Image: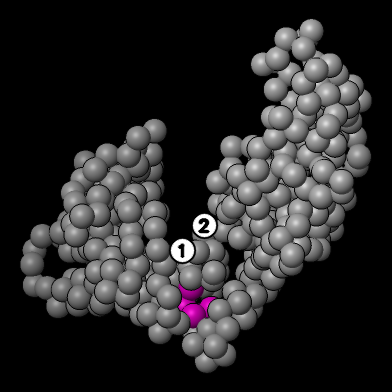
Amino acid sequence: MRSWQIFKIWGIPFKIHPYWFAILFLFSWSITNQVNLSSGDIYNTKEAWIIGFLTSFFLLSSMIFHEIFHTFVSLNQGVKIKKITFYFLGAILQIDKYCQTALGNIKIAIVRPLSCFATASILLMVSYYSSSQEQIAINVISRVGILNLFLGFLNLIPFGSLDGGNLLKSIIWYFSGSKNKGRKLLNKVNLFLSFFVLFFGIVCLFRLNFYFGFILFFLGLFGANSSKSESQFLKIENILKFCKVSELKLKPLRKIEFDSNLSEFNALIKNKKDASDKYFFVTNNGRWAGFVDENILKTVSLKQWERNFVGDFKKPIDSLVSVSRNDRLWKTIERLEETSEGFVLVLNAADIPVGIIDRLKIGNFVLNKLGFNLPSEIFNKLNFKNHYPLGIELPRIINLMKQRGDL
């Protein structure tokens, strides 16, 4: 569903997702039930619904205020934000560029919890010292203050993408000088908390409240899986950043002598093992002279094949996109994504072609490094698609690393 824009500040659209209205109703209904159970002798049903709705509405309003303040600090620390979408109890930011300093990330992570605590303090003081006779208004103010206090502590939990998690890894980054140390420690903390919640959820399932236990069990399981995914993500980043093309098993170049006629060329094409390969590299007495595309057969009459030679149709090798054997894997992937052929030529230190690398070769190398060994049957099936195996999105990972300043 499309989100609806509510306003625009500093060129950044602030949007609300349509699901928010359903959650607003459910949250209002939940608070209304609490009011009926705890203060049914003070408020009638209509007043309880007013309290429930206003509490939910002003909670969102305070969250928008917190996000504006958070956005202001983020922009001052060099973050580039494309848009912000609210989902009632949180907001999702689409970021084009992240903060590049540990201290800047600490400031960004702490601002939202501090805003929640400041709002909660003001609202709770107003409700405590107010002499107003408007009991409904005081009740709403008090509830919004308590919920802001809850959100402040919730955001400080060192878990996942919560502000507390970002704060923990940024503090470790600041004192250790290593960004990855903070991410690794946070991931371990997330795994520990996930198993704790998972265990507590199992206890609740059989001993306390089944519904509450089921929610905790699901959250713990989700957190454990997220932690495992983050570990794999960190491994992939290290592979892309530090591994070189020379570590990969290259696809050999298919050769043909420059004085071979087109009939001989056609025979080689019929015997090729990989249907996706359409290029042959031309040699002249053992030296590379260029390359040809098998489509040249379509441009010459069958009767002329015996009298036309491959060397007459060759193209210069330097017209192909190439990489060095010493290039890092992430640079090679960027070069690969620029091509229309779906492969890059690998050159040695003397700029002599030594092989070909494509998406399948790179993807299979990364998966092997992660401990996944694809069976040959699957490997051969994927070979025709020229995609990274198992849908692994290496170009997107590289873009995220660049946005965070890791490359």
Residue type, mark 2 in image: Asn
> Residue 66 appears at what percent x and percent y?
27, 66
| Image height of 268 relative to 369, above or below | above
Occupied quadrant, residue 136: bottom left
Point out the stretch of residues depicted in magenta. Answer: 166-170
- Is residue 9 positioned above or below 261 on the image? below
Question: Which quadrant: the C terminus?
Answer: bottom right
Residue 269 coordinates in the image, percent (x, y): 84, 25
Disc 2 residue crowd, few under 14, some 14–19, many 20+, Cα 10 Å: some
Left or right of residue 355: residue 16: left
In the figure, is residue 247 to the left or right of 122?
right
> Is 139 on the left or on the right of 367, as rendered?
left
**For mark 1, what is the residue?**
403
**Prevalent SS, magenta region:** helix
For the residue pair 34 and 388, the one nearer the viewer reads as: 388
- Identity of the amino acid at label 1? Gln
The foreground one among 390 and 7 is 390
As helix, strand or loop, the secondary structure at mark 1 comes to helix
Res. 377 in view: yes
Name the residue: 46% across, 63% down. Answer: 403
**Which residue was labeled with disc 2?**
399
The answer to whether the residue labelled 2 contacts the one labelled 1, judged by CB atoms less than 8 Å apart, is yes
Furthest residue in direction left, as rendered: 132
| Residue lying at 16% horizontally and 73% vertically, measured from the top left | 126
Badge 1 density bin: few <14, some 14–19, many ≥20, Cα 10 Å: some
